[in-house]
Amino acid sequence: MNEAEVNKRIEDIFHSVLGSGLEAYTKGDRQIESVIYVELLIAFQNEFKIKFSTQEFFSLRSIDNIRKGVVDKLQK
């Protein structure tokens, strides 16, 4: 899977879970609610067949950190 495909799948998951509110989350205008946050991480784990540790769950609290965390996991 190339980088463009990974980025497309990441964006698709963000849009699927966050819907039209994605822009507010990326600007930092809106905090990710706990339930939505868990839904996001589970969706990424299922889509990419990766696993986040409990410690990673605590550090991936922004859209950018989630994106970076997924990419890092895929590169390992």
Image: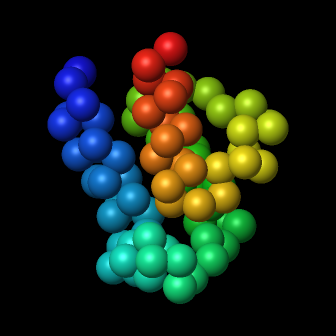
Residue 2 found in image quarter: top left
- Where is residue 23 shown, x and y percent of the image? 37, 77
49 over 40 or under it: above or below: above
Residue 71 placement, left or right of 20: right
Residue at position x 44%, y 63% in the image? 17
27 over 54 or under it: above or below: below
1 over 25 or under it: above or below: above
Residue 54 found in image quarter: top right
Task: Report the front residue among 27 and 45.
Answer: 27
Task: Report the front residue among 71 and 20.
Answer: 71
Task: Report the front residue among 72 and 16.
Answer: 72
Residue 16 found in image quarter: bottom left
- Where is residue 31 shown, x and y percent of the image? 63, 77
Residue at position x 59%, y 66% in the image? 36
Is residue 72 visible to the viewer in this orientation of the structure? Answer: yes
- Where is residue 63 shown, x and y percent of the image? 51, 59
- Where is residue 26 shown, x and y percent of the image? 44, 71
Residue at position x 24%, y 31% in the image? 3
Residue 34 placement, left or right of 2: right
What colour scheme does the image use?
A: rainbow
Q: Residue furthest top?
A: 76
Query: What count of labels does the image hold?
Result: 0
Is residue 43 visible to the viewer in this orientation of the structure? Answer: no
Residue 47 placement, left or right of 73: left
Residue at position x 37%, y 53% in the image? 13
